[in-house]
Image: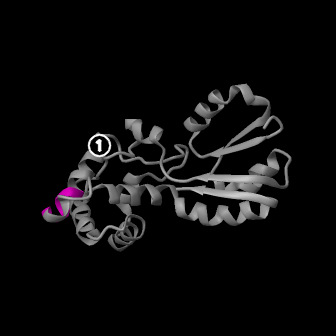
Amino acid sequence: FPTLKVIGIDRDADALTRATARLAPFADRLFTKHASFDSIVDVVASFGYSEITGALFDLGVSSMQLDERNRGFSYSHDAPLDMRMDRTQSLTAAEIINTYEPGRLVRILRSYGEEKFAVRVVESIVKARAVAPLNSTIELAALVKNAIPAATRRTGGNPAKRTFQALRIETNDELGAVNRAIPQALELLKVGGRLVVMS
C-alpha cells in the first residue's frame, strides 16, 4: 500500500521509539504521537486530517512491558509496583494499593480482575499496608496467594494474575480510554472504513 499513511498513537514512549525504528523505511508515511488513544480526534487533526480509512486498537499490556522488570507489570519477578503504560503520569499501582479505601479496591478487583476472593485479598492488603506501604510486585503476589484458599490455588495459574490485571487496568484507566476512544474513531471513519479492536 504505497500511498497508505499511518498515524500511530501510544501512551508508552518506549513502544513508539521501537515502532519508529522498525518502520524507518516508511518514515515519510508514518506519523506518531505520544498520547492515549482517547485523544484520537485531536491527534488526527494535529496531522492535518479530519477523517480516517481505518482504525486498529490493540488493547492491553504488551510483551515488551511484561518483559521489562522495572515496569512492575509482572508478578514473576520483583520490581516496584508501577504498572504505568505512560511513565509521565503520576498514578502508580503502589498508590492505588496503599491509598484507595477498601471498598473501592474490592470493586476494582471484582470488576477488572473478576477476582472471586476480592474481599479476602483486600483485607490482606489493608492489614499489610497498616504496617508498611506495599511497593513490591513479589510482596503483593505473595500476599494475594496467601489470601486465596489453597484448594483454589491449585488450578488456573498464578493466583495473583487477576489482581495484577485489575490494578493495571485501574492504573491506566484502560476501560475508560476505550469507552471514550471507540465512538471518536467511529466518527472519524470514512464511509466504508473499518474499525478493528484486538484484545
Is residue 146 within the magenta segment?
Answer: yes
> Residue 8, can we see it?
yes
Instruction: Name the residue: 43% across, 48% down.
Output: 83
Residue 80, placed above or below residue 145: above
Residue that extends furthest to the left in the rendered view of this protein: 150
Q: In which quadrant of the rendered view does residue 129 lie?
A: bottom left
Query: Pointer 1: residues within 10 angstroms few (<14), some, or many (20+)?
Result: some
Residue at 36% of width from left, 70% of height from top?
A: 110
Look at the image and give the residue range highlighted in magenta: 144-150
Secondary structure of the magenta portion, mostly?
helix
Answer with the quarter of the image where residue 175 lies: bottom right
Q: Position of residue 39 (x, y in %)?
A: 69, 55
Q: Is residue 43 left or right of residue 37?
A: right
Establish if 17 lies above or below 63. Answer: above
Residue 90, horizontal then vertical, whole percent: 50, 50
Is residue 170 located in the magenta-colored stretch of the structure?
no
Q: Is residue 136 visible?
A: no
Disc 1, SS? loop
Q: Amino acid at mark 1?
A: Ser
Q: Is residue 32 left or right of residue 129?
A: right
At a point 41% along the width and 47% down the height, the residue shown is 82
Q: Which colour assignment does the render follow?
A: one colour
Query: Disc 1 marks which residue?
Result: 76
At which x and y percent is residue 127? 21, 63
Residue 30 coordinates in the image, percent (x, y) = 74, 36
